[in-house]
Each structure stands twice: as C-alpha cells, then as structure tokens.
Image (cartoon, helix red, strand yellow):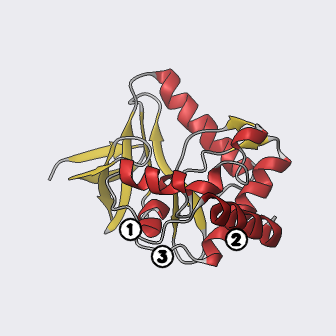
C-alpha cells in the first residue's frame, strides 16, 4: 500500500475517496482512519488552515487537523465513520438532539456575526457532538440564517425534498406543505433558539 509522510506522521493511502466538502482520500495510521487533502496552491492550503483556526477559536466543532505540511500543500484531519446529516435526513433519522446541537452551533456563529453553510451534508453527528465539515464562513445575513433558510433543508419541506432529490435520494412520501414546514421550523426556533 502506498504511504505518505505528513509532518512526523506516516499514513497509508487507501483507494477510498472523501467528498465532504473537499475531495480527498482516506488514509490510515495506527488503525485509525483520517482524511488526506492535497491543495493546488499555498493560498488554498493557508485558507483551509485559517478557517480551521477560526472555527476552533469560536468553538465550532470541526474535525481536528492531525498533520499538515505547507511545503507539500497537504493536510490530514479526523474522519468520522458516520453518515452525514443529509443521509440521516434521507433515512428519516434526524432526531431532536441533532437539531439542538445545530442551534447551539448557530448561536455561536450569530454571536460572532457570521453564518455557516447550513446544508445537512456539511454536518456529521457522532452520537455526542455535531461536527461542521464545511469550509464556509459566511458574513451574517438574515436571509440565509438558519431559521429563515437553512432549517428548511433539514426537514421534508419543498426545499428539503428538492435538495434530497438533487443529491440522488428518493423523495420522501411524508412531504410537508409550506404551512407545515414553516410551523415545524418555528417550533424548533422557539424550542432551541
């Protein structure tokens, strides 16, 4: 198996591909799986590291970077062998604990006047913590806030069902009409915001 050394750590490269949100490969070190990312430029690498530091600074849970090399333009971060929240939504497995954690993350972002990419494929839940896989730090915008925009992609609303279909999932049979979707979002906002 091919190997790569990043910093002081040696990783075995697998053929498994990661696509959330960057394209990378699964690598293994000491029987633990990680995600390896190659960057096209020093600017891309520095942007990735800078965003990671920003998320950590503001206590947004993100996969930990375990090794990096500016010289080789590579970074290795934790990998979670769990489904993204989009897959959970497609399988009707989004529970209240996930939504509560999403609003906790949203509260932090709003306190510091930014938003995240609230699409469910940008999140994984390991049973205890919700992790943001995305790389976007978006200037605070009421139109695209969690309660005005993002939450509609976490339920079987018109937007959520269309998104699931575009990502290759079957459209749920229990689709909500506009009034039901708005009510569901309002109830979550009242409960968790």
Q: Which of marks 2 and 1 is in front?
A: 2
Mark 1 surroundings within 10 Å by alpha-carbon count, few (fewer than 14), some (14 through 19), many (20 or more): few
Residue 85 vs residue 181: left or right?
left
Counting from the top left corner in percent of width and height, residue 166 is at 37, 47
Q: Give whichever of discs 2 and 1 has the lower sequence position.
A: 1
The residue at the far right in this view is 111
Q: Does 109 appear above or below 96?
A: above
* Residue denoted by label 3: 93
* Residue denoted by label 2: 100
For the residue pair 114 and 31, the one nearer the viewer reads as 114
Q: Does 158 appear above or below 36?
A: below
Q: Which corner quadrant of the image does residue 23 belong to?
A: top left
Question: Cβ–Cβ below 8 Å for labels 3 and 2?
Answer: no
- Secondary element at image label 3: loop
Using the numbered discs, state the Cα–Cα distance from disc 2 to disc 1 in whole angstroms: 22 Å
Q: Does 30 appear above or below 141?
A: below
Counting from the top left corner in percent of width and height, residue 181 is at 63, 62
Q: Which residue is drawn at 68% across and 55% down?
A: 60
Q: Which residue is drawn at 79% across and 57% down?
A: 107
Counting from the top left corner in percent of width and height, residue 54 is at 69, 42
Q: Give whichever of discs 3 and 2 has the lower sequence position.
A: 3
**Which circle marks residue 105 in the picture?**
none
Q: Residue at x 34, y 59 (%)?
A: 169
- Secondary element at image label 1: loop
Question: Cβ–Cβ below 8 Å for labels 2 and 1?
Answer: no
Q: Quadrant of the C terminus?
A: bottom right
- Secondary element at image label 2: helix
* Residue denoted by label 1: 81
């Amino acid at each position: 198996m091919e190997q790569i050394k990043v910093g002081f750590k040696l990783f075995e490269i697998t053929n498994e591909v990661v696509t959330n949100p960057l394209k990378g490969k699964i690598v293994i070190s000491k029987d633990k799986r990680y995600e390896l990312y190659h960057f096209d430029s020093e600017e891309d690498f520095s942007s990735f590291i800078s965003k990671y530091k920003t998320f950590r600074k503001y206590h947004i849970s993100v996969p930990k970077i375990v090794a990096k090399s500016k010289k080789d333009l590579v970074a290795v971060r934790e990998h979670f062998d769990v489904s993204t929240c989009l897959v959970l939504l497609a399988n009707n497995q989004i529970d209240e604990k996930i939504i509560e954690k999403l609003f906790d993350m949203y509260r932090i972002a709003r306190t510091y006047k930014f938003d995240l990419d609230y699409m469910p494929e940008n999140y994984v839940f390991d049973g205890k913590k919700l992790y943001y896989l995305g790389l976007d730090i978006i200037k605070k915008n009421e139109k695209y806030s969690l309660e005005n925009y993002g939450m509609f992609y976490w339920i079987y609303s018109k937007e959520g069902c269309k998104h699931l279909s575009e990502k290759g999932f079957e459209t749920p049979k229990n689709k909500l009409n506009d009034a039901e979707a708005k009510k569901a979002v309002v109830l979550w906002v009242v409960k968790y915001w």
